[in-house]
Amino acid sequence: MNSFTRPVGRLARRRTLLGATALVGALSVALVGCADAGASSTSGSSSSSASVAGLSSTLTAAASKRASTITGGKKIGGTVTMVGTLGGTEKERFLATLKPFEDATGITVDYTGTEDYTTVIQSGVQAGNPPDVMAVSSLNMVQQYAKEGKLVDIGSLVGDSTMSKNFTSGLLDSTTVNGKNYGIWTMLDNYAVYYNAKTYKGPKTGSWADLMAYSKKEAATGTTPWCLGLSSGSTTGWPGAYMILNQLLKQSGPTVTNALSNGTGTWDSPEVKKAFQAFGAIATDSTMVAGGASGALSADMATSGSGMYTTPQKCSLFEWGSYATSILLSADTSLKPVTDVDFFSIPASDAKYADTEGYTGTITAAFSKSAATKAFLQYEASSEAQSLIAATGNWTAANTAVAASSYPNEISKRVATQLLENKDLVALPVTSIDPAVKAALYTAVANYVQNPSTLDADLKAIDTAQAAVK
């Protein structure tokens, strides 16, 4: 059984934990794990990317050595075409992690990043000319193409023993279909609450009710507690969807959350409605969110968190993905990790789910089994390559052998060693649901924030979209 239907599991025995770290530059437009903010269609190889000078020379040398070992010290050449979600700064940083591979093997990685990656990949598959590999946030895509016999199983390219050694059984299960593994997790992401460490005086532990009580108290004094941005073109609403699904997980647990992932649950259930309303207590209240509901709908999430550091301050709390730290630090280089920017885990509404964390991420899957593709996937699965991914400050490496010391700042290191320690990881439904269902979810969020009275109808619309794809 593949774990599209179950949580990824407890990581208590891991020496290096799959923490979530800072991800992208302030103006980056495509988000790992989310991938819904959208990247403009861009392509290129690491030979034209930003220099790897910002990465540790020790880690870079180790990655180069690993790449050379993979090809037996030979520059075998060739090209690997890759379609993914990244654009802008994100793409350049990712390509920088591939430069040691290209230099050592002579293989060019031709990367195309686009917000319309689903259509681009599907068109290639239908035309009989898919990319060699895809790097996507959708387990649904991996599952579908694997069932259709379009993907090459990773065990035949990388080796099942190597995968078992480098990745948790839960992550392997999540990309396994009919007994074969079809994906490599390269990056993980989860949400947390970020705050201005110099001004925030509220709770950092306790329940969601405790945090909301503080927020309401602040709002009553005329101080707006929350920043929020939901604008994202055709996918407007997606940041709210992630917040709602995290609320659902922390309120109702993995069973209810996973039922949405596998299509056995209903979106108009009381549990989902309650999670929407918990989000709405912030997003639809003009005293709780900077700019009010209309401001949230028109603001970009990638820049709205900077309101914690304006003069006068617009807000003091910001719930977003683990890439928020890098965005905030890139937007204002005077800010320092921990001193100015810090985080705490999303408080649970039900105490028994305090140690449960939702995640998304990026999975690399292969349509080709060429020598160049095989070498590339072996590199991507290695701890050396994923240590570079961690070192960019953009991503959480999924490989269990990546040391916390690979991460570039104290928050990244603390996240990697603390945030997910002894936690149950659950893949959020956005990784598994059909694109049409996801689109209906995002529309429901935007409609709800604009007019809360539409909630019941919008939840039924998500169920209608779900029924249409069964």
Image: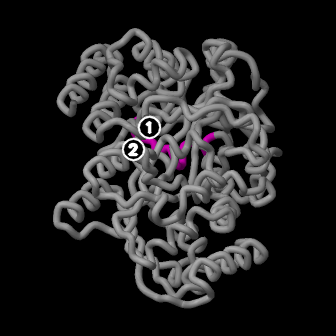
Task: Using the rendered image of the protein, determine whether residue 229 is visible from the camera's viewpoint.
Answer: yes
Few, some or many C-alpha atoms within 10 Å of disc 1 (few <14, some 14-19, many ≥20)? some
Of residues 128 and 201, the one nearer the viewer is 128
Q: Give the percent coordinates (x, y) of residue 381.
A: 58, 62
Disc 2 to disc 1: CB gap under 8 Å: yes
Residue 31 image offset from top left, x and y in percent: 48, 52
Q: Is residue 304 magenta?
A: yes
- Residue 397 in the magenta stretch? The answer is no
What type is the residue that disc 1 sits on?
Answer: Asn
Where residue 379 appears, as percent x and y from the top left, is 58, 70
Magenta stretch: dominant secondary structure:
helix
Q: Amino acid at mark 2?
A: Val
The residue identified by callout 2 is 177
Q: Does 90 sit above or below residue 269?
A: below
Q: Please, is residue 34 above or below residue 376 in the view?
A: above
Task: Decide which of 202, 285 is in the foreground and name it.
Answer: 202
Q: Disc 2 on helix, strand or loop?
A: strand
Q: Nearer the viewer, residue 279 or 131?
A: 131
> What is the span of residues highlighted in magenta in the rendered image?
297-307
What residue is drawn where x is 78% and y is 75%?
A: 58
Residue drawn at x 75%, y 30% is 200
Crowding around mark 2 (Cα neighbors within 10 Å: few <14, some 14 to 19, many 20+) is some
Pick the quarter of the image with the N terminus.
Answer: top left
Q: Is residue 295 visible?
A: no
Instruction: Give the residue at x 23% y 70%.
Output: 129
Quadrant where the image shows the C terminus: top left
Badge 2 or badge 1: first in the primary sequence:
1
Is residue 400 rendered to the left or right of residue 172? right
Pointer 1 residue: 2
Q: Position of residue 251 (x, y in %)?
A: 55, 16
